[in-house]
Amino acid sequence: MSSRKSYFSTIELVLIPMFAALMAIGANVTSFLVIGGVPITLQTLFATLAGALLGSRRGALAMMIYVLIGLAGFPVFAQFRGGLGSLVSPTFGFLLSFIILAFVVGKIIERSSKKSVSTFMVACFVGLTINYVLGTNYMYFAYQFIADLDAITYGMAWSWMVAPLVKDIIFTIFAAVLASRIYHTVNKNANPLQRKLAS
């Protein structure tokens, strides 16, 4: 019982905050690139890896911690932004989607009996779809009803996502392959007790 508790404490105290920190880094490592008000970041990559490697619950928790830290005022969002004002930002929908993305990616992998590369690929691309659908629709809503910018059409909002999409498709494939290899390497090297604790 103590081993199980110690194992999960290590996961929660190290890996969850680590992925929250990676999100902050990924948000701003390319913060100078902005297309149509949409910053080109590496957040989708790290959110996908969080779900694939930490699982649904821990992955979503890591993303939730990241979002809460930003809302608390720390400049961890894209372009070093933070604070409650982010709630009305056109890009806040993408931040919310990272929580759902990580949960769904992790859940698909957890429920799959065959942890193949294709399983990871499907899970990661489902996550990417969630990210774009929620994020882009929220962005359009924010421009139309919060910023009251009627000139921003629904088609225009989606057109801004073309450039980030190319990057995110490449990184999603990378995330799926990397997560699959890490998963199988960890499980291959783990002893029976460790595999039981990780289940």
Image: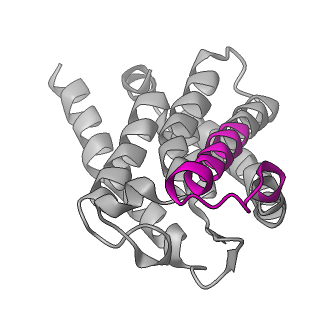
Which quadrant of the rendered structure holds the C terminus? top left
Instruction: Decide if residue 168 is on the left or right side of residue 38.
Output: right
Q: How is the image coloured?
A: one colour
> Which span is picked out in magenta?
129-156
Instruction: Decide if residue 88 is on the left or right side of residue 111.
Output: left
In front of the other: 17 or 87: 87
In front of the other: 104 or 91: 91
Q: Main secondary structure of the magenta part?
A: helix
Classify residue 126 by image quadrant.
top right
In front of the other: 79 or 197: 79
Classify 60 as above or below 171: above
Classify residue 197 by image quadrant.
top left
Q: Position of residue 112 (x, y in %)?
A: 67, 17
In front of the other: 95 or 22: 95
Instruction: Decide if residue 112 is on the left or right side of residue 56.
Output: right
Asked if the magenta segment contains residue 132, the reply would be: yes
Q: Position of residue 168 (x, y in %)?
A: 75, 57
Instruction: Decide if residue 120 is on the left or right side of residue 105.
Output: right
> Residue lying farthest bottom?
32
- Residue drawn 47% across and 39% down? 54
